[in-house]
Each structure stands twice: as C-alpha cells, then as structure tokens.
Image (tube, rainbow, N blue to C red):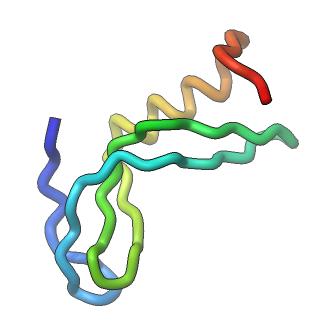
C-alpha cells in the first residue's frame, strides 16, 4: 500500500515510501520492527510515518506478545 507523502517539510526533497527497520524505545525496553512502510526523504533522509503505522507500532509495544527476542 503506497501512501503519497508530499515533499519533505525540512528540505523540500521528494519523499518516497520505503520499507525499513525502525528502532523504538518505550518504558525502558528496546523494540526493533522490520519491514515498516515509511516515507523517507531522498535528500535529507527525514522519515515520515502515517497515522496508521504509528498507531500499529504503539499497539505492538503495549502488547504482551513477543514474536522474537535477541
């Protein structure tokens, strides 16, 4: 599912959707999410999350289910 992110708020560069690893720290825990769809500026690298992706990440860190540990 591709989202139209528009131009970068910081530098005006083109933002394209990529799938990346996202690290997330919450309540003293470290979480690493793989294959997350994120808008990334081609010029400065600024990342943009849709509301849906942000809500899903929040839901996952609050879930008691752990899929994999390192």
30 sits to left or right of 41: right
Quarter containing the C terminus: top right
Q: Work out whether 19 lies above or below 68.
A: below
27 sits to left or right of 41: right
Question: Which picture quadrant has residue 67?
Answer: top right
- Judged from this view, the residue extending furthest toward the top is 65
Quarter containing the N terminus: top left
Q: Work out whether 36 lies above or below 9.
A: above
39 sits to left or right of 36: left
Question: Which residue sits at x=41%, y=40%?
Answer: 36
Image location (x, y in percent) of residue 16: 20, 62
Question: Which residue sits at x=46%, y=29%?
Answer: 56
Image location (x, y in percent) of residue 65: 68, 10
Image location (x, y in percent) of residue 42: 27, 75
Question: Which picture quadrant has residue 59?
Answer: top right
- Judged from this view, the residue extending furthest toward the front is 70
Question: Which residue sits at x=19%, y=60%?
Answer: 5
Q: Nearer the viewer, residue 68 or 63?
A: 68
Question: Which picture quadrant has residue 62?
Answer: top right
Question: Which residue sits at x=56%, y=37%?
Answer: 33
Image location (x, y in percent) of residue 12: 22, 86
């Amino acid at each position: 599912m591709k989202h139209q992110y528009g131009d970068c708020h910081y530098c005006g560069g083109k933002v394209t959707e990529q799938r990346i690893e996202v690290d997330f720290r919450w309540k003293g825990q470290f979480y690493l999410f793989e294959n997350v769809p994120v808008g990334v500026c081609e010029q400065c690298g600024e990342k943009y999350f849709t509301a849906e992706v942000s809500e899903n990440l929040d839901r996952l860190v609050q879930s008691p289910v752990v899929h994999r540990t390192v």
